[in-house]
Image: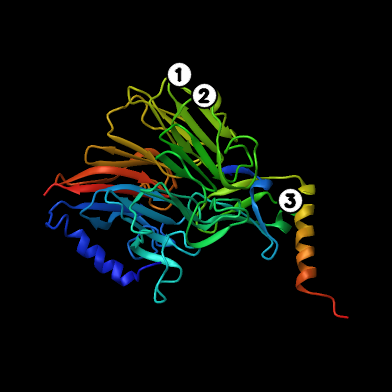
Amino acid sequence: MSYYDQIEIEDMTFDPTTQLFTYPCPCGDKFQVFIDDLQDGEDVAVCPSCSLMIQVIFEPEDLEEFYEEMNTDDLVAQPIAA
Amino acid sequence: MFTKLKQNKALNFERAHLIKGRRTDEMFYVYSCGSNGRYQLGNGTDEDLNQLERVFETTFRPVKVVCGGNHTLILLENGDLFSAGDNTHGQCGIVLESDSEGDNVVRFTQVPRIGGVPWVDCSAGYEFSVFVNESQEVYSSGFGLKGELGQGEKASKSTILKKIDHSFNSETKKIKSCLDHTVILLENGQVFGWGNGRSGKLGQPAISKLWTPRQIETGFEVMNIEIGRDFTVLGGLDQNIEILGKDKFSITSQIPNEWIDFKAMWSSVHFIKSNGQILSIGNDSHGQLTKLGDYVKYDLFEVGSEHTILQIGQSIKSWGWGEHGNCGINKTDSVTFDYINEIHKFPLNESIIGINGGCATTWVITQSNE
């Protein structure tokens, strides 16, 4: 498998709502990978519009802050009923 | 502030046929092919093209075609500016009519002048654009979370053109935008940049979000700039070169001793030597690096995000990553064009006066000889 490039997770954008890490693809669309897939050991982000793939460079502990971000958002979105 | 589009279109038509009160027969054409998911080719469809199609015509010489992720700007010598493609965040610089095709500008449409002042330069980043007018005012529009608009702290979206509050004290010599940063070279040699500076591609100190223009300190007088996805290349007299930012392909260690020009794809730099030879350094995952060897008899050489465009006489050729038709019709079933492919040969009644590349798009400007 040949990657277009290797990209550090710090350079990707994380959206807590979609739970996706994204990074611009040279075709104009965006490479994407779910945080859970990274957690499961997957390290490839794919572009929905073309065949290019990037390898995401990260350590498992890098994901913690993003999971926290998701949980914080959940709390805001769904306040616990009294 | 914005004139109604329909009025604009009528005006353009009028202007296109009159120069200083006389009709002119001189015609210029813009052709495009490649990635077209957001109408960025400006031909009214969202289908990719693997052959060049005429998408714009004008009596004023087009001086620049620049491409963002999914939008395109065409600047004419008379200071008129046109755009097409993804306008979700206003990156086309146009306020769309309600009957338009989603958030897309499907054909080239005029970007209104501000205060009637002609545009003199422009650049396009991933989801934003930067516009320079004759009064040396710099405007931006579009979207960017990392300071791409240059409009100040946390200004990440601007659906209309807003002025960047910075007084550049010299005329613009060159402006370039890539993914998430913009660099501007002034006639007095000063260089300014804004946007994502995390890796140091906007100089030191490396700041991840530079919301306003900041001068880039250089050790020599800068004559030329090019930018890639993760880096900025500054070139000066006496073969001085400085690469700011992430140099993951070890470009710095391979710079030739002698060059007269250089071009940057997203992840590679291509030096042109005085004898015309091209030396490519960087990512070759999809055949991006030069296929020319010692061949130097080309007329124009330009690059897109990850492919090359070459003019040899009446012929337009290409190599590199051509998945969207931007390198023409492929001769193999691979998206990598690791050979020089002819995209089109123009008839003798049209002269090629400019070429350029975008994000998997290819652009050719011609002048009619009839």
Residue under the image location 28 percent in, 39 percent down: B311
Q: What element carries label 1?
A: loop
State whether residue B16 appears in this view. Answer: yes
Using residue B313 as the reference point, say whether residue B227 is left or right of it: right
Q: How crowded is mark 2: few (under 14 residues within 10 Å), some or many (20 or more)?
A: few
- The reply to the same-chain question for discs 1 and 3 is no
The amino acid on which the numbered mark 1 sits, given as a three-letter code, is Asn
Q: Which structural element holds mark 2?
A: helix
State the CA–CA distance, disc 3 to disc 2. 35 Å
Which residue position holds label 3? Answer: A41
Residue at label 2? B254
In-front residue for pair A69/B147: B147
Query: Is residue B68 in sight in this rendering?
Result: no
Tag 3 secondary structure: loop
B247 horizontally vs A63: left or right? left
Look at 42% across and 44% down and name the residue there. B304
Q: Using the rendered view, name the quadrant where residue B102 is placed.
A: bottom left
For mark 1, name the chain: B
Q: Distance between the residues labelled 1 and 3?
A: 44 Å
Q: Name the residue under label 1.
A: B257
Q: Is residue B336 left or right of residue A5?
A: left
- Chain letter behind tag 2: B
Q: Name the residue: 76% across, 45% down.
A: A59
Q: In which quarter of the image is residue B278?
A: top left
Residue A10 placed where, x, y %?
68, 46
Return the chain for callout 3: A
To the question of a shared chain for discs 3 and 2, the answer is no
In percent of width and height, residue B319 lies at 39, 40
